Image: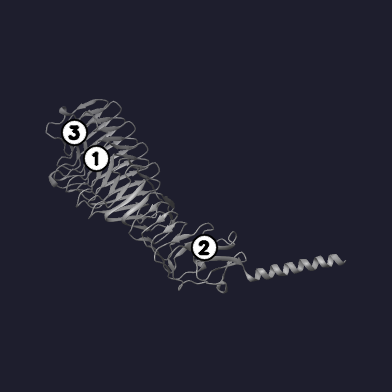
Amino acid sequence: SSVTVNGGTLAASGVFTEFPLALNAGNMTLTGAGSSWNTGTNTLSVGNSSQGASVVVEGGASVVSEGLLALGMNAGASNNSVLVTGSGSSWSTAVGNNSSWTVAVGDGLNGVNSSSNSLVVSNGGQVSATYFYIGNLVGSSNNSVLVTGSDSRLSNTDYVVIGNSGSGNSLVISDGGRVSSFSAWLGYNPGSSNNSVLVTGSGSSLSNNSSYGTAIGNRGEGTLTVANGGVAASTGGGIWVALESGSVGTLNIGGFGTNDAAGTIDAPKITFGPGTGTINFNQSNSTTVSAAISGNGSVNQLGSGTTTLTGNNSYSGATTVASGTLLVDGQIGLSDVSVLSGAAIGGSGTLGGSLSLAAGAEFVFSLNGALTVNGASVTFGDFGIDDLVGLDSNVANGAYTLITGNAAINFSNVANLGAQNAVGISGGKQAYFSEGSLVVNVIPEPSTYALLGLGAIGIFATLRRRRFL
């Protein structure tokens, strides 16, 4: 069955007779400015215990709900959907004096299976609520919300939860869509696994400004990916990763395994909790993170691009540079840093742990400033002048320190030590490391000295001939 409202008002009591109000395996469309539906204070279930029920709100139509809106409430409720699309189209549950206006995409009442239900907000449509759940209770899995298109908004005055107790639930914010809330939680309760948020595309954002911030893996599992110019903003409490023991949280800058462009983190801090927390930099372009990273977690540079860390970081897990470049212009106070073959490290900041470069790893040469390493050691698998990135013979001339600090440097696998082992670097120059330190010396090649000398003798002889003519 289907109901279409075009330019009129639909009263809930005129269509639904059961409680809660339930649209089971039917379709409803509200279209055009002036079309409206007020569900009252009733709970509205789109797909109460059924499959394939849908509501479309388009062309400036509006729906007002003062009770719970559930997409897929009871056992067997799957593949039910709501679409709010077009400028002026809206679904609001944040009205009146009720403090519990809730939207649940995949409710899973009483722990029953409620899966693959979806909400799409597109092309300037707007949805508002107080509390918002995607995958609310145990058994609510693989439910999804998509907010896409410029001026498309999902606005929540309190929290948004992706995977409260359910698993495999997702929120995608793309192409200028925006989701705002008091706080955001991914994988809230134990057992909630593989829940995710993707923020991608210029103008797309997930934002909150409370002291609770964004928690990626509260007591369950969650992944937040910020890519292609999208923004994750938690300007109050910052971002928490693997907040409690037993949780798993992952923050991806750029899509994991995709090597796409970075998104932006707008937060004063990123804090690892006692769970298993990871930050992956997967991007193919350059990005800078100024947030202070702390706690018990690890950081990986995996994409082909460049990541610059400028904050005062004190996280204690490992730092691995497996691809691309990591520039430390701030501080990594406690972590040991490993650079694998084909990857590079550099910067003018400070490492408080040890630094190891595998054979084939590279170091970014700089005319201004050295990387300070105060950990136990600096070791190399196989390192020479040809492993320096950005050594430009046109501008480099003289002595330049690569690494300084209190760490013991192991030179056993370092080539080009001493002037006798200098190597040519083009432009009539050669370079070598000073013995006992990582100082790069760039000097003219001996043949250049000889040519300069011959040139000077020639000029002197010419002047003498002219003098005595």
- The image position of residue 453, as x and y in percent, is 71, 69
Q: Are marks 1 and 2 in contact (CB under 8 Å)?
A: no
Residue in front for this viewpoint, 462 or 436: 436
Q: CA distance from mark 3 to mark 2?
A: 67 Å
- The image position of residue 70, as x and y in percent, is 19, 39
- Sequence-wise, which precedes: disc 3 or disc 2? 3
Q: Which residue is mark 3?
A: 67
Q: Secondary structure at mark 2?
A: strand
Q: Residues within 10 Å of mark 2 (few under 14, many from 20)?
A: some
Q: Secondary structure at mark 1?
A: strand
Residue in front for this viewpoint, 353 or 192: 353
Is residue 257 depicted above or below 461 in this figure?
above
Q: Residue at x 31, y 30 (%)?
A: 60
- The image position of residue 135, as x and y in percent, is 21, 45
Q: Amino acid at mark 1?
A: Phe
Viewer-nearest of discs 3 and 2: 2
Q: Seen in the image, is 449 located left or right of residue 433? A: right
Q: Amino acid at mark 3?
A: Gly
- The image position of residue 274, as x and y in percent, is 26, 55
Q: Residue at x 66, y 68 (%)?
A: 448
- Judging from the image, the colouring scheme is one colour
Viewer-nearest of discs 1 and 2: 2
Q: How many marks?
A: 3
Q: Which residue is mark 1?
A: 132
Residue in front for this viewpoint, 423 or 49: 423
Q: Quadrant of the N terminus?
A: top left
- Sequence-wise, which precedes: disc 3 or disc 1? 3
Q: Quadrant of the C terminus?
A: bottom right
Q: Residues within 10 Å of mark 3 (few under 14, many from 20)?
A: many
Q: Residues within 10 Å of mark 1 (few under 14, many from 20)?
A: many
